[in-house]
Amino acid sequence: MNVTASTPTVFDVQRIRADFPLLSRSVHGKPLVYLDNANTSQKPASVIEAVNAHYRERNANVARAVHQLGEEATAGYEGARDKLARFINAPSRNELILTSGTTQSINLVAYSYALPRLKAGDAILTTVMEHHANIVPWQLVAARSGATVKAAPINERGELIVDKYLEMLTPEVKLACVTHVSNVLGTVNPVREIARECRKRGIALLVDGSQAVPHRPVDVQALGCDFYAITGHKMLGPTGTGALWAKREHLEAMPPFFGGGEMIREVRFSGTTFAAPPHKFEAGTPNIAGFVGLAAAIDYYESIGFEAIHAWEQQLLGYATERLREIPGLRIFGEAPEKEPVISFLLDGAQATDMATLLDLQGIAVRSGHHCAHPLMQFYDVPATLRASLAFYNTREEIDAFIVALLKVRKLLM
Ligand code: PLP
């Protein structure tokens, strides 16, 4: 998608905001300006109502009961799988494992796909711009197997050096990993191109889609990757929901990660047989109400459409970037030409946490810290940044309020 910051769009943001109850609250006596959407998004009333209605009207466990409530709860949970599969254009609902989020999705691949294949001398390739969820699980399985974790570099603008990434896809690499969109820089990585090159070399590719799915349509078949991990709470859904899409051939070959109820065919002390994917990977009682909420979140996205969402968010990103660039001494981290609406920055001479605290007193919620991306902080040689991350329910007026508050903070701290 290529929408410039100046594309005029008719987007009824006030009507949309009315669907998000939390957006009308105040903080420290000031109207809330919520710019921490990459951390977790706010939820529309339809999602909150769906969770509420599940507990009020349909609460039962899934796949265990023949009674009416059990059937309704199962239909809600399995219906979410159908919606999620369609949402990312998975070829089959059976290739979609419902998890507690990206962290669990990636750990599942680490322990169930990577670990059994890794031996001393092998490698896993990731990048310097990853969230810790796409680094630490690889380090854990590398330590157990004698493999190593390699990280492809980025440039000062916060772009992946793709040639270098491809050069690092050497025969020892048993799995390649990359984030679709950086949670700190907003950079959109060329996943299709990377996937094509991985396929040529027979290396499986895992994509961390946490920061992509809230902003753009994702088609895992068009991307051509092997694994795609998503988290529900950043895309209007409840916390503790997410998914892993994986190609059927991988899921069939992978042993289960968790053992317990619901993932078996038959249990005997002489040997247990397992259910077919996806249930083989879903031991125990899942977050049923959460997934019912996530299904409602997908309905909400579809009622607006990603074309309109993307165009509006790109306008906001362009406007916010322009306004921030006017502030003397302000440095933006991440200036790739294709970005999602995430802006990390620092002001000369000011600590990120002090600034976030002072902004909070004015009702502005931004994140400060390392954003679970220590290697990226090390690359830029800073301990932390401030991060303003936008969603389609944000407005230009909120960006104006943010800039006014930031200028006040600057005066106080300079
Ligand atoms: N990957 C990226 C790029 C993220 O931004 C996040 C969350 O911030 C995660 C992974 C981890 O997601 P979760 O904590 O929902 O599992």
Image (spheres, helix red, strand yellow):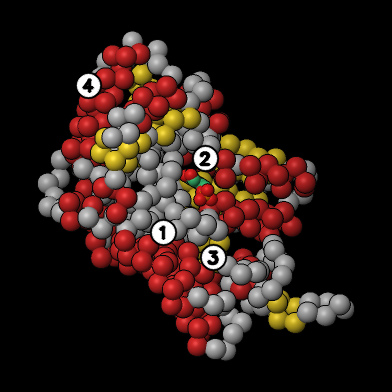
Q: Is mark 3 within 8 Å of ligand 1?
A: no
For marks 3 and 2, give the CA distance. 27 Å
- Mark 2 or 4: in front is 4
Residue in the picture at 36% in, 66% down: 49
Give the x, y percent position of residue 335: 34, 31
Give me the C-alpha separation between circle 1 and circle 3.
12 Å
**Three-letter residue code for mark 3:** Asn
Residue at numbered disc 4: 326
Q: Earlier in the sequence, mark 2 or mark 1?
A: 2
**Mark pair 2, 4: CA separation:** 29 Å
Report the Cα–Cα distance between label 2 and label 1: 23 Å
Which secondary structure lies at badge 1? loop
Residue under pointer 2 = 130
3 or 2: mark nearer the eye: 3
Between discs 1 and 4, the one toward the N terminus: 1
The residue nearer to you, when weighing 181 against 30, is 30
Q: Residue furthest front?
A: 29
Assign a secondary structure to mark 3.
loop
Does the residue tagged 2 have its C-beta within 8 Å of any atom of ligand 1? yes
Q: Residues under labels 4 and 3: Cα distance?
A: 46 Å
Q: Residue at x 43, y 19 (%)?
A: 351
Q: Amino acid at mark 4?
A: Glu
Residue on which disc 3 sits? 287
**Could you tell me if residue 28 is visible in this image?**
yes
Percent position (x, y) of residue 288? 51, 69
Relative image position of residue 348 (x, y in whole percent): 37, 14
Q: Is residue 58 above or below residue 383?
A: below
Q: Is residue 48 above or below residue 392?
A: below
Left or right: where 87 falls relative to 396? right
Q: Earlier in the sequence, mark 3 or mark 2?
A: 2
Mark nearer the viewer, 1 or 4: 1
| Residue highlighted by disc 1 | 237
